[in-house]
Amino acid sequence: MRAGDKGSRENIALIGFMGSGKSETGRLLAPMLDLDHVDIDEIVAARAGMNISGIFEAEGESGFRVREKEALRAALQGDGMVISCGGGIVLDEANVRLLQDRCRVYLLHISKERAVERLSASGGRPLVAGGGLAQKVGRLLNEREHLYRDAADEIVAGDDASPLELAEEIAARWLRYRSAQREGNIPSS
Ligand code: S3P
């Protein structure tokens, strides 16, 4: 991070594992702060004219990652946004640099147990489809846990919080951060 960059970070990014509540939390958070909400998976699907599973089938994970990266770049042409990222956004170093340059990054952290519980009740996620959910989640979390933590400015505990509670918590933290920024007393990340 270059000195002075933080003053220009006008966006909020929500990162975290599948099932951590990034989309719903972002949708609730944005109007609390009078910001716009952008969901990277939704942009990807709209641009491709297919849902996420369809993209994985047609183009593989690598095709999806290219689209995800393009969608993040396009979204970050603007300011004043809450950006709900897909769980794999942190796999690409350039994505992480861009997020850190342009956003205050909040990690919605959930445990493996909670992720398994939530993902077993929902579909549409090709990386954990087709059985062996707990093993798949465990492997992905092992690969990614440090990437999430390294990319985050702040970590929010998500196991026992609803999207509304998460949104309220992040809104309060953001307002504290912005007021510290205005006073020239910017907390280091
Ligand atoms: C992915 C997470 C998904 C979606 C895609 C890949 C991942 O988004 O981008 O299925 O690699 O973790 P959510 O985190 O919103 O489920």
Image (cartoon, grey):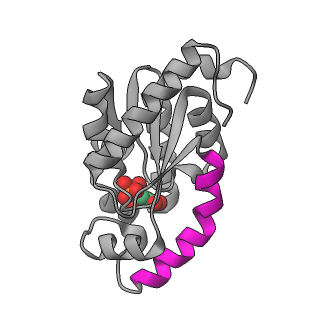
Does residue 76 show up?
Answer: no
Image position, residue 45 (x, y; %): 31, 47
Left or right, 20 with respect to 148, comes to left
Does residue 37 show up?
Answer: yes
Q: Is residue 187 above or below residue 67?
A: above
Residue range corresponding to the magenta coloring: 133-151
Residue visible at 34% across and 34% down in the picture: 38
Image quarter of residue 85: top left
Q: Which quadrant, please, contains the C terminus? A: top right
**Quarter of the rendered structure image containing ligand 1:** bottom left
Q: Is 142 inside the magenta-drawn segment?
A: yes
Q: Is residue 156 above or below residue 58?
A: above
Q: Which quadrant, please, contains the N terminus? A: top right
Residue visible at 32% across and 40% down in the picture: 168
Residue visible at 40% across and 21% down in the picture: 80
| Nearer-the-camera pick, 53 or 159 | 159
* Count of numbered tags: 0
Q: Is 146 inside the magenta-drawn segment?
A: yes
Left or right, 60 with respect to 7, comes to left
Image position, residue 177 (x, y; %): 52, 27
Image quarter of residue 141: bottom right
Image position, residue 152 (x, y; %): 58, 45
Image position, residue 37 (x, y; %): 31, 32
Q: Main secondary structure of the magenta part?
A: helix
Residue visible at 36% across and 49% down in the picture: 22
